[in-house]
Amino acid sequence: MTSNKNLVPRRDFIKTSALGLSALSIGLPLNSALATSCGSSGKDKLGIALVGLGNYSKGQLAPSLLETEHCYLSAIVTGTKEKEKEWAEKYNIPKGNIYNYENFDDIASNKDIDIVYIVLPNSMHAEFTIRAAKAGKHVICEKPMAVSAAECKAMIKACNDNNVKLSIGYRLQFDPYHKRIINLSKENTLGSINYVNADFAFTIGDPTQWRLKKDLAGGGALMDVGVYCIQACRYSFGQEPIALRAQAFNSGNEKFKEVNETITWQMEFPDGKISNSTTSYAMSVNSLFVSAQKGKAQLMPSYGYGGIEGFIKDEILEFPKFNQQAAQMDTFALNVKNNTESIVPGEEGLKDMKVIEAIFKSLEQNGARILI
Ligand code: NDP
């Protein structure tokens, strides 16, 4: 996946740098200063606990939490002892705000934690979302929401039962390029949308990683990056698919003995509209194409953290550098503060998981048409 080394608009960087400087100059840990810097109520910035300190937490979420206005990194949950010291020093996390997977439930009594952000392997999402909800914390859970629709339903129920909010890490719904695509159907800019092609694939490396293990990943590229294609087709049409057919391809590479290597699928939307998608761990594709009555739109590359390019009819799209993760987390913090609903709630993750299950069902039945 594309990484964007320069995610922060310069204006925001200056603002954050100035905050950091004043925090250091009065001898406060940076995060404490950030937590109280916005006003006197004491909770202007909500505390986020990152659960699972892997690549996405380290490379994207934690750095973005230095740029957010309404939330900050207040706590960490890790199963790797060596990470505790490194993260505590880098982000000024107090000792009392460091947890592991065993004592995780103790977060219930920690007032520095308002939101728990689950960034674990896919099959651990449900367990930790439910435990976080029972601890009375609001939850952001990474995509894919879980590894089955039943798990998604249990997660939604746990959050409802405990009166906490649940949001899924669908960062692209906050991105300005994707927002323009989402608006096509809402504003009817190009007339009726007839066809969407959404492909996302990359060549996977290390054969021992959890993404290639069925019990941790729940599936291959479909769970990991194919879910972006399902999202993109759904929000490009602004409608839900009613049926699909799927096909799987496997080169016989040992890496893919537990999960699918390449899957293609076609979805039917109301009024004869169709989409076509490919996802794979054995090739590189990253695009979204929309064909409508009065013109076409395309994003390519489409799904990265930055570097998105594209057009809508005659207009070349061009937006300043944008921090998707900061926007996603800030928006959820405001949802919590203002008691409003996330634009990417658990129900959104459940809809995608139902499509994923229909794709696997179609594969089991040799590409049969499956109603969703
Ligand atoms: P990594 O493998 O880099 O990190 C996962 C972390 O989970 C590990 O570092 C470890 O953290 C913890 N962990 C706990 N148990 C296990 C286990 N049995 N095996 C492996 N790791 C374990 O994964 P990513 O950060 O890339 O992905 C994590 C989640 O985030 C996935 O669900 C993925 O789909 C999602 N993601 C979303 C992205 C987006 O753009 N929205 C981008 C990338 C990932 P520790 O050592 O702290 O315990």
Image (cartoon, rainbow, N blue to C red):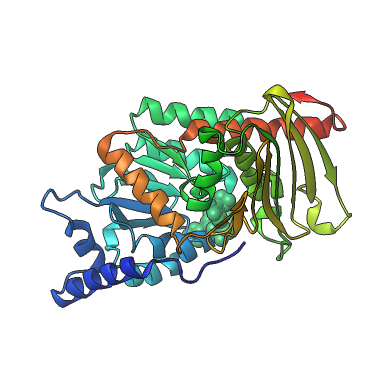
The quadrant of the picture occupied by the N terminus is: bottom right
Q: Residue 211, relative to residue 115: is it above or below?
A: below
Q: Is residue 269 left or right of residue 351?
A: right
- Number of marks present in the image shown: 0
Q: In x, y percent, where is residue 188?
A: 55, 34
Could you tell me if residue 122 is visible in this image? yes
Q: Is residue 212 left or right of residue 36?
A: right
The quadrant of the picture occupied by the C terminus is: top right
Q: Is residue 80 left or right of residue 330?
A: right
Query: In which image quadrant can residue 9 be found?
Result: bottom left
Q: Residue 119, relative to residue 127: is it above or below?
A: below
Q: Which residue is pictured at 34% across the width and 52% down the height? A: 48
Q: In x, y percent, where is residue 35?
A: 22, 57
Q: In x, y percent, where is residue 173?
A: 50, 45
Q: Which residue is pictured at 37% across the width and 70% down the height? A: 85
Q: In x, y percent, where is residue 231?
A: 60, 40
Could you tell me if residue 98 is visible in this image? no
Query: In which image quadrant can residue 15 be found?
Result: bottom left
Q: Which residue is pictured at 13% across the width and 74% down the height? A: 26
In the image as oriented, which residue stretches furthest toward the left?
40
Q: Nearer the viewer, residue 260 or 238?
A: 238
Q: Residue 266, relative to residue 18: is it above or below?
A: above
Q: Quadrant of ligand 1?
A: bottom right
Q: Is residue 278 left or right of residue 148?
A: right
Query: In which image quadrant can residue 143 be found?
Result: top right
Q: Nearer the viewer, residue 120 or 341?
A: 341
Q: Nearer the viewer, residue 33 or 15?
A: 15
Q: Which residue is pictured at 17% across the width and 73% down the height? A: 22
